[in-house]
Amino acid sequence: LALLSDEHRSNQRAILTSGGIQRVVAAMQQHPRSSEIQSKGCWALTLWSTNNSSDQVVLADTDIIKRVVKAMELFLDDPATQSEGCRALARMSYEHSFNQHTVATAGGIKSVVEAIKQHPDVSKVQAAACLALAHLSDGSTFNQTTIEGLGGIQTVVGAMHQHPNDCEVQ
């Protein structure tokens, strides 16, 4: 489903209206021990929320944010799940205050900070996590305070120091 919808708005709409998003979440719930299903599920959710504010509301309403956070908690050692989970949280929270708050209360900020700490040498994780923290903090004093309280500022500075040649981390 993810590839069918990549940059194809009418297919995204069809997936949304036919219950495709809920099906992906159900697969993630039914296969909690599969890092591949968790990372690919997060990847699909990223594609469906990209530049699509109406789907961001649907994603929050279907408890997907909690599922993404759970995937990140279960597979902290897997860079693919961490990267895709961070990207999904970043896209869902982009310019969407309700989703920003939902991510924070679901433990998503903690998961993003942990991803940076767990994978200091994986630039893909670092870039996705920095993007997630940027989107989560944008316009949210609560999230800014939470990020700072979890050591997120120091962690991002460390990522920038560790990956000086990676534009997406800088």
Image: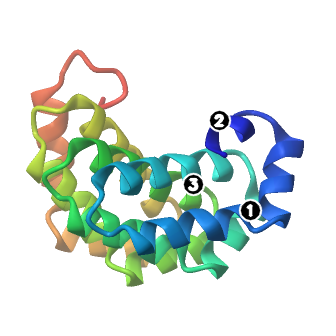
- Side of 38 where 59 appears, left or right: right
Tag 3 secondary structure: helix
Q: Are marks 3 and 1 in contact (CB under 8 Å)?
A: no
Mark linked to residue 55:
1
The answer to whether one can see residue 144 in this image is no
Residue 14 location, x and y as percent? Answer: 86, 54
- Among numbered discs 3 and 1, the one appearing first in the sequence: 3
Q: Amino acid at mark 3?
A: Leu
Q: Position of residue 62 (x, y in %)?
A: 62, 79
Amino acid residing under circle 1: Asp
Kindly give the residue lying farthest to the top in the view shown: 165
Q: Residue furthest right?
A: 10
**Residue 34 visible, this angle:** yes
Residue at image point 71% right, 61% down: 20
Above or below 169: residue 165: above
Front residue (pair 34, 165): 34
* Residue closer to the observer: 66 or 131: 66
SS for dot 1: helix
Badge 2 or badge 3: first in the primary sequence: 2
Q: Secondary structure at mark 2?
A: helix
The quadrant of the image that shows the C terminus is top left
The reply, left or right, for residue 169 in relation to residue 27 is left
The image shows residue 32 at horizontal and vertical percentages of 32, 69
Q: Residue at x 42, y 66 (%)?
A: 68
Q: CA distance from mark 2 to mark 3?
A: 11 Å
Query: Which one is closest to the eye, mark 1 or mark 2?
Result: 2
Q: Which residue is mark 2?
A: 3
Q: Which mark is residue 45?
A: 3
Q: CA distance from mark 3 to mark 1?
A: 10 Å
Residue in the picture at 57% in, 54% down: 45
Q: Amino acid at mark 2?
A: Leu
Which circle's residue, 1 or 2, is located before the other in the chain? Answer: 2
